[in-house]
Image (spheres, rainbow, N blue to C red):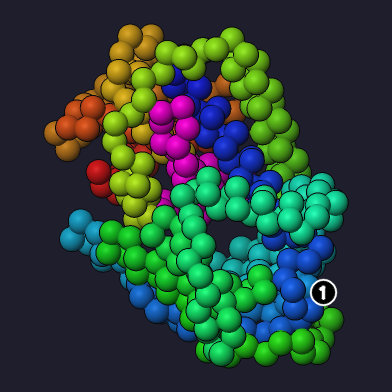
């Protein structure tokens, strides 16, 4: 198993772990230390609009509706998009409603029961340690207490972004990375209010695509990838990986402005001397960005089968990484000024032009 294949499996493993942690953090029996509430947010920056958030049963039931317009400028081009989306979660079952595209999905949150049981069995000190461990793993820190809407909030910083959190509820967030500004500020917050039970049920008359089967296939794939990783790791094959000199904070900043259309950034991390970012669309489509030292790309026989072509003054390589359980494509981009290669991985695979267009959005 060569370096490129290792990078792909590492990215998928990271994704499964982070998804599990997100579910545990979001679906625990006491997500918030407030039984119910309604928050109205004003969105400013590159995204302007409003967001309304209802919750009950200490956060096990939530309703979120965002209506906004986003404008970004990159490489002399202006991109505009509109959002009108509702997401409902009710005891581990979710519904996603896109009022613009008309594409609606429903399914069960993976790891819901396991994550809930794990948190319930933890002491308050153990829960705090888990939260701190996750925070520190992403370079975050606690920065004291500040008031928002007259309520004392803990201020948290993570990779250039800040959040003000009151009893588990985020009342304010700010992010400015590479010129892209995203701010959410609560302008109204009602605590412990009575909310109709049907608020957390999907509207009638809509058709939903059930993604449970896709989720199960995805989780089976994650399990197999983790088993392969564990077997491979036991052979100590990672000893030969050369660490990357390119600073991780700069990689993370570049990923703030690189968001493939229709995808959501899941996480950015660094491990084994390489940097990895993962973007997902639903639970089946994944884009991974891997930054690795140029020294790791030498004498990799898999590249012999890749198509080589010139684009933007660089020699790109495009090839197939499909396996029995996965259809994958890779685009290799050299950055000799940083002694670095960027590997774009798409599962399922995308054609060459689509991946090249995506690569044009990278800035290092």
Where residue 49 sits: x, y (%)? Answer: 45, 81
Answer whether residue 65 is visible to the viewer in this image. no
Residue ID for mark 1: 57
Q: Quadrant of the C terminus?
A: top left
Of 48 and 211, the residue lying toward us: 48
Secondary structure found at label 1: helix
Q: Main secondary structure of the magenta part?
A: strand
Residue at 46% from the left image edge and 27% from the top image edge: 272
Where residue 263 sits: x, y (%)? Answer: 49, 53
Of 11 and 317, the residue lying toward us: 11
In this rendering, the count of numbered labels is: 1
Q: For the magenta stretch, what is the residue range?
A: 258-287
Label 1: how many Cα within 10 Å (few below 14, some 14–19, many 20+) = some
Residue at 57% from the left image edge and 37% from the top image edge: 14
- As drawn, is 320 to the left or to the right of 79? right
- As drawn, is 111 to the left or to the right of 302? right
């Amino acid at each position: 198993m060569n370096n490129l294949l290792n990078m792909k499996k590492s990215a998928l493993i990271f994704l499964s772990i982070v998804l599990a942690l997100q579910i545990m953090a979001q679906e625990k029996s006491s997500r918030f230390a407030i039984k119910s509430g309604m928050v109205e947010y004003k969105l400013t920056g590159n995204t302007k609009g409003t967001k309304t958030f209802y919750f009950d049963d200490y956060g096990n039931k939530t309703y979120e509706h965002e209506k906004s317009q986003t404008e970004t400028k990159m490489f002399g081009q202006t991109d505009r998009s509109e959002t009108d989306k509702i997401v409902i979660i009710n005891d581990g079952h979710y519904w996603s409603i896109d009022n613009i595209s008309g594409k609606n999905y429903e399914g069960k949150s993976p790891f819901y029961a396991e994550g809930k049981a794990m948190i319930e069995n933890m002491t308050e000190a153990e829960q705090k340690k888990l939260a701190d461990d996750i925070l520190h793993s992403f370079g975050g820190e606690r920065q004291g207490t500040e008031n928002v809407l007259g309520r004392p909030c803990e201020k948290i910083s993570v990779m250039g972004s800040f959040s003000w959190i009151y009893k588990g509820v985020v009342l304010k967030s700010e992010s400015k990375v590479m010129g892209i500004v995203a701010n959410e500020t609560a302008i109204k917050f009602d605590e412990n209010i009575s909310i109709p039970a049907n608020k957390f049920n999907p509207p009638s008359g809509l058709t939903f695509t059930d993604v449970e089967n896709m989720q199960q296939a995805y989780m089976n794939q994650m399990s197999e990838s983790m088993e392969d990783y564990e077997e491979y790791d036991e052979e100590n094959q990672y000893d030969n990986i050369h660490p990357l000199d390119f600073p991780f904070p700069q990689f993370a900043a570049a990923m703030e402005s690189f968001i493939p259309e229709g995808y959501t950034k899941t996480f950015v991390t660094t491990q084994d001397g390489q940097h990895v970012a993962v973007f997902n669309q639903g639970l089946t489509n994944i884009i991974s960005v891997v930054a690795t030292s140029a020294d790791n790309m030498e004498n990799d026989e898999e590249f012999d089968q890749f198509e080589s072509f010139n684009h933007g003054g660089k020699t790109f390589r495009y090839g197939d990484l499909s396996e029995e359980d996965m259809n994958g494509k890779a685009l290799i981009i050299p950055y000799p000024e940083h002694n670095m290669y960027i590997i774009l991985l798409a599962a399922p695979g995308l054609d060459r032009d689509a991946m090249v267009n995506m690569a044009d959005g990278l800035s290092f």
